Amino acid sequence: MTANEITFYVISGCLLVAAVLAVTTRKIFRAAIWLLFSLVGVAALYFWMEVEFIAAVQIVVYVGGIVVLIIFSVFLTQQTGKEMTRAPLVRIISAVFAVLLGFLLTWLQINHAAFTPAGKPFNWDVQNIGSQMLSTGKSGYALPFEAVSILLLAAMVGCIVIALKSPDHSSNNHPTDNHSPNKNNIE
Amino acid sequence: MSYASYIALIPLLPLTGFVLLGLCGKTMFKRTAGIVGTVLLFIAAILAIYTAWQYFFVNGKVNGVYEPVTALHFQWLSFSETLHIDIGILLDPISVMMLVVVTFVSLMVHIFSLGYIKGEIRFATYFAFLGLFTFSMLGLVIASNLFQIYIFWELVGLSSYLLIGFYFDKPSAVAASKKAFIVTRFADLGFLAGILILSFYGESLDTGTLVQRLTNLQSPQYLAVTTASFAGITALSWGLTMVFVGGAGKSAMFPLHIWLPDAMEGPTPVSALIHAATMVVAGVYLVARLFPLFYINHASLIVVTIIGAVSALLAALIACTQTDIKRVLAYSTMSQIGYMMFALGVSGTGDNSQGYTASMFHLFTHAFFKSLLFLGAGAIIHVIHSNEVKDMGGLRKYMPVTHATFLVACLAISGIPPFAGFFSKEAILHASFLSNKLIYAIALFTSGLTAFYMFRLYFLIFWHKTTERAQLHNEGSFIIKGPLVLLAACSVLAGFIPFGTFISADGKPHESAVEFSFSVAPVLVSLAGILLAMWLYKNETALPRKLAASLGVAYRIVFRKLYIDEIYLFITKKILFNLIGRPAAWIDRHIIDGLMNGIAAATSKISFAIKGIQSGKVQQYTMYFLGGVLALTIVFLYLWT
Amino acid sequence: MKQELAVILLIFLLLFIKLGKKEWKNERLLTLLNILLALNLVSGFTGNTSGNLFGNMFRTNELLIFEKNLLNLGTLIISLQSTAWLKTHKHVPEFYLLLLSTLLGMFFMLSANNLLLFYLGLELSGIPLAALANFDLEKRRSAEAAMKFIFSSAFSSGLLLFGISLIYGLTGTLNFPDLAQQLTGSPLAIFSFLLFFSGLAFKMSVVPFHFWTADVYEGAPVAVTSYFSVISKGAVVFVLLAVLYNVFGMLSGVWYNVLFLLSVLTMLTGNLFAIRQQNLKRFLAFSSVTQAGFLLVGMSGQSPEGSTSVIYFVLIYIFSNLAAFGVISHVSAVTGKETIDDYKGFYKTNPVLSWTIAIGVFSLAGVPPTAGFFGKFFLLLAGAGKQHYLLVSIAALNIVISLYYYLRVVKAIFMDNNAEPIEKLSLPVSAKIAMFICLGGILVTGLASGAYQYIHSLMQ
Amino acid sequence: MIPLSHILFVSTALFFIGVYGLFTRRNLITMLMSVELILNSVNINFIAFNKYLYPDKLDGIFFTIFIITIAAAEAAVAIAIIINLYRSHQSIDVDDAGEMKH
Amino acid sequence: MNLSLLVIIPLLTSLLLLPAKGVKQVRLVALLGAAVQFAFCLVLLYAFVQERSSGNNKAFLFETDYSWYAALNIHYHTGVDGISIAMLLLTAVVVLAGILVSWRQASNSKEFFFLLIFLSLGAYGFFISLDLFTMFTFLEVAVIPKFLLIGIWGSGKKEYSAMKLALMLLGGSALIFIGLVGIYMHSSFNGTHTFDLTQIAQSNISLAVQKIFFPFAFVGFGIFTALFPFHTWVPDGHSSAPTAASMFLAGISMKLGGYGCLRVATFLMPEAAHYYSAVIIVLACVAILYGAFATMMQTDLKYMNAYSSISHCGFVLLGIGMLTKTAINGAVLQMVSHGLMTALFFAAIGMIYDRTHSRQMAELGGLLKIMPFISTVFVIAGLCSLGLPGLSGFVAEMTVFMGAWQKAAAFYRIATIVACASIVVTAVYILRAAGAAIMGPVKKIEYNQLTDASWNEKLAAGVLTTGILIMGIAPFWLTKLVSPATETIMNKITVLVNGNII
């Protein structure tokens, strides 16, 4: 087993363990940290695959952006030290069952497909990515780029509208709702 | 030889009366409705008599027989190339005779009704219905097509229904009208089935063609109808028996007679017309019309004979015990029609067709004296306002004309010479004597009974003890008395018509063969009956009661009309309503409808049962999502490939 | 591309309005926007060219243009209908901005000739919608709806992406025409197809991927609900149609069975859940689930007639659903009443609105002479195209079940008595215009065969 | 040389770990974290396929970049919604937001 | 003769109703519309007879054919034969009478008349259509107005009944739909699928296919015409409906089913009709007798008439099931007759109900004294129902019996006799109803204040009664009208069936 291989297994192992912990630990802050580790692990995997650019993007966006965002929202909404309530046992059991079954099925299919590597070296460079990203010709990605920019704009506007506390309603701590909770049920 | 010009008027005139009086009788003919109806009928009667004169005496015989003449004929409803209902007018001896009888009796009843029904609010309606009846009856007798008979058969049933229920606010009248219609309708079902059977094999609905084809032993139709069979009985027997069932219903033959006594709820003149003289003999007329067919089918003829004889006897027995004047007359009618029936039953054709002639003869004479009896009873009821004989008595002093005519009628029905009944009844007795001694014995016995119960009635009404009611009123106007006298005259004279020369089974005339010596026994029997009645009922004595008591159970059974009504009631109420109707309605509402509703209810149940799936928890939703994908994967990768 | 550019133009216009100093009054802004949307719709019909752009990543043809016009039309109607609600809303420009970006997303999705653009379009039409669902900012249910939608949608796009990644792994291309040739019936291809399909089926509310539908429809503002049920769904139907026929054509044996199974499930489940709903929005949600089932029946026909009938049905569905939703939206905005019981006796006070709902509902139910009848008839006829009658029979019976609850609404409105019926309401002008468009559409589209013939002519 | 299937194993495992988290976490923010895991697993797939199978083109890489971007946007909107939900429900427990059902 | 006028006139009428103001204008417009339509139908009859007597022997006359949905080969194809003419006349008469009867409809009269007219539009369109799609469309058009009419203006448990009726009828049309789709898919004319009736009739569908789709089409249409056991909408629907709607329901709507059974199911799939004839006959006989017995137990007049409709419509199905020319003729006659008779019956019951506010036989009584006109109408309708000669019922029933009797096998014989037996039961329930409600003593004193029929009611009853009488007294013209059309159907059946058997 080469060092390369060992590195892979170590990274993968850490990544998966961190991921498992991220979805099982009962302290939310720890969960966020495990998630961070897991995402870093993914970045490491990219490094291992020699796709450094993506690894960088991964770290910048996820670690620098999303995880921070998550942690902020944790602070905004929760006492960090408190243990989270566990889901009902039935749900956990069925989730385990469903997930295992799903994994099994998926893995069976993937394994069965027997992909044959092309055996060619993977040549990419940032410049290439950059020029393709803004090219409108064949295998150019200008249009997706524009689309995603609109998406980001829309998401931003949406976030502002939703998350910003409107000053007029600051006093309104008890949201009103026209419906009593059970009105939609006819028993 | 053209009859069409005026003969169609005979039925159409009463119809005009019906339409005219029915549509605008209330507004236009408030008082004159009766006059209008009567005048129209008067014209019809004149035409009928003229027709008879022309038929029998002007046109006369062709090749020694009176030819059937189809005076008018058009296709009314076509079923197929061979089967179609034709409306037509067929003149032959019996239909011409019936024309006369119907129009004449109807005219008498019309006139009588002018007095009888006066003051009634629905005066116009009454005459309209009478018109309708007369029209239907005429249509029936002149029918050339079997289905035409059926059509008018139903229509006379309707008129009967309407007239019985004329006093519609009396629940008993309503019930009686209902009963009459339903019982006859039941019988009509038989008639209809008979028509279906005969027409299918005979491939025609025309009476003449049918008779001609099915009596021709070489015709394919004859072969078909005699070879086809169901339950071991040939189609011909089935068809004729079924037709006879229809006739028996209309003619109140045992056991379909139960409607007739109840039908007396109608106005008495109506009873005289419909339930004595005309409609009830339609059954006899029907059998006579198809007589050649019956004749070749011995089985059905036996049925006719037996039913006729049994009816005659039973009705006479029951009549002896009844106290309602009209009911006695009703049973008497039934008994007399029984006579006519078995007379047909024992008849042969050709030279042997005495029974046929006798039957028709009796039909003819009976029409006069029985309507006379009813009208007499009507006159009495008009005065007494009761049907019960116990309210009458000693009326001979107060109602002399009625008394006299009633006596004539009683003598006529008892078969005392020289009244009309004597001749016709002797002919029947003679025919049965020649054919079957048992029938003859029954007939003779019944004849005695007839004399007994008629004179029982006579003595109870006109002699016996005078009641208070009897003294209250006078006899009534000329309008009431006139028809009585006319009919009495007919009852006396009708017997002298040489009937055999006009009517016989095959159209060939034959002389009446009754010998004087043969008549002795029946007359004696009748006289014995009369004397017995006189002894028991002329004065008020305890004898009748004692006699009844000594007869005990037998008397009770007869008094309760053999419990036939109760049996019917049991069948209809308990079986039809409770065992079929009610379950049918229940099943429909609860099982079939319940099934339909059940489907809806089950859907809604399921809907509620599965609502928990939509739990409102987004994690479960995602789990279902994954579950769905996995299930699809399993199905399409492993199961459904 | 012109239609997309027009929408982008509008988006930027809204951005400037929002960022600009001038304070716009809602009424004027709404009028302006409605006019602009109308212009947008009109312009969509003219001067379009077919062809491919951006290195074949983007394609357009007459059919796509027509489909986009339909979506434009629906958006315009919804906009006209929601004035009563938006008049008092604080974030009108943002609302429209988000709405139009989702529309743009759908356009991209429709025109995508490439999985990446397709995916982006899908997300662009999904993520802002989640924000829109939350636009009743003070309502608990609105927040709940948005949350349910974003998580369900995230999960579904996760599966979809996984499927796309496998497809990519199998074929090495993202280009639709290439994919169509390379995707064969290998198990992994089928598996990745199922993942992909489920992601779209989610948007179309196909059972068992429909669970979000009712909750989101109920919680979201009515305008957004209409948008969900008509535009979003319609776009996905168009896309699915194109994708199934063009990309997964080689797998048609598989997806016919998938459609068969899911359409039966969808119709049944939608019906069974709709039967006992009290809340009208929830009710319409399940009814739209059922309609999705019928659409699948038509899709399974695999013929030009099948595609035609599906698109035709969407057109009719826009009119019918919006006719009903339009009134409900107004009533909800003015009185806050949304349950069927509230609508008892509605006919006594608001006959015109009652008839509008009734006609809409009849059209949804598929009763002639409304267009819905024609739509359903042709869908089912197309579904029988391969002489498979079982599916059509099941669908026909489901139509009967669905009639029960549609008629239940009519019954409540017309036949039931109510001590306190909803008071007399009058629609704003814009909503009236919308109403007439819808009713006109319902009555004309079916009886005049033009629309169907036109769509059919595009199917070459 | 690590076979491709091992990398795919990792990504698949990561995917289902994320799914498990999404199924069982009651805290909305942790659910969001699970979603991120799911998206990451897809990214790994894309990169791996691109590198090992189709090194000629950069489709996988681009897809990944866009997924990351969209993940960010999605996360942002989701967090905004969560915050709004928290404001109205005073809770970010997913089961507390289950008013609408049946 | 442009047949489309039959659809256009009601359409215009209903459109004219929209701007009409007030009850008076509304009902006037409705009446005018119905009268014009009636007149047009008479003109059509005249033209038809003229055309036929001038030797035009085409199966359908006055055909017009427009392509509608060209892509699916759907046409708007109209044309009439004798059967359709009879049905159109029936519809026109019933519509006219129905509008007259509802003259005093006060609440929401505009919508009421609108729906009535719209319902009739569906019926007219149905009867003139020669394209299955068009036909089906018109059939469904006629359903929803019934639902609304019953639910809004009905009485009793109206919502339940309306719902039940609508669901069962639309369930029926779902079955019809399946049948139509099957026919369409297996028809081929010049290489394309077609909905055109005349073309399908020429493209012989294989027996195996017919066997599958005939039951769908037949049962589907059968539900409309109260095929046992799918008849349960009939009692509830009819009894809850307002008078005019009851008349339309029983008089027109149920005929749609019978006509469809004949024109679509039997005509297009004759071999299957032959194959299934025993089943049809058994069901029809059950409906006839069992319906009659169930009728006997009803205490509510409307229920009684509704149940009797089940029994009477059984004759239609029996006639069709027997597959002889006479029997099919009879089925058509029975449709016309039952339409007129039952409409008259419902009209009379409605008039009684309007005055006494009761339909229970036990509560009524002696009405003949208080309202002689209405009572007479009631009795006439009853007599027609029990098949009295001189009224239409007799003609129709006898034709069915005669036709049924043409089949000599014992099974058919027994079926015929069973059907015949119903005439007795019919008499029982009709007389029972008449005896209880019309005759007898007056049960309530306040009834004595009630008035007899008003002019509009008299006119309505008069129109229907005239129809009944014309048909009852002079049936020959009607059979002459219908016979050639049934012959066309029969020829097809005979040829195919014989061809197969031999």
Image (tube, rainbow, N blue to C red):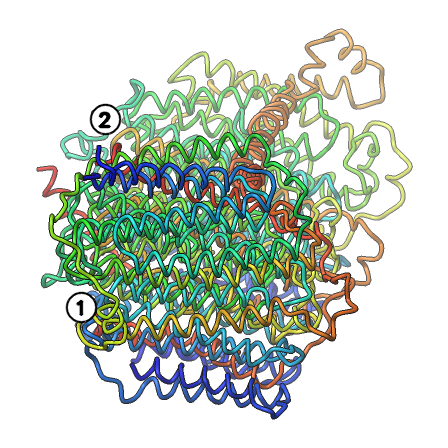
Residue closer to the observer: C107 or D82 = D82
Q: Mark 1 and mark 2, same subunit?
A: no
Give the farthest residue toward the right: B468
Quadrant in the rendering for residue C137: bottom right
> Residue placed at 49% from the left, 54% from the top?
C403
Q: Is residue A156 visible in the rendered structure shown here?
A: yes
Count of marks, rendered view:
2
Is the Cβ of the residue at disc 1 closer than 8 Å to that at disc 2?
A: no
Q: Which secondary structure lies at badge 1?
A: loop
| Quadrant where the C terminus of chain B is found in the figure | top left
Residue type pointed to by label 1: Lys
Asked whether, in this view, residue C241 is left or right of residue C31, the answer is: left
* Residue designated by label 2: B228
Q: What is the chain letter for disc 1?
A: E
Q: Is residue B268 above or below residue B411?
A: below
Q: Is residue B52 visible in the rendered structure shown here?
A: no
* Residue designated by label 1: E58
Q: Is residue B463 above or below residue E189?
A: above
Residue closer to the observer: A140 or C248 = A140
Instruction: Give x and y (percent) for residue E322.
Output: 29, 42
Q: Residues within 10 Å of mark 2 (few under 14, many from 20)?
A: few
Instruction: Give x and y (percent) for residue C104.
Output: 39, 74
Give the farthest residue toward the front: A3
Instruction: Give x and y (percent) for residue C87.
Output: 64, 81
Residue type pointed to by label 2: Ala
Q: Residues within 10 Å of mark 1 (few under 14, many from 20)?
A: few
Asked whether, in this view, residue E461 is left or right of residue B481, the answer is: left
Give the farthest residue toward the bottom: C22
Mark in front: 1 vs 2? 1
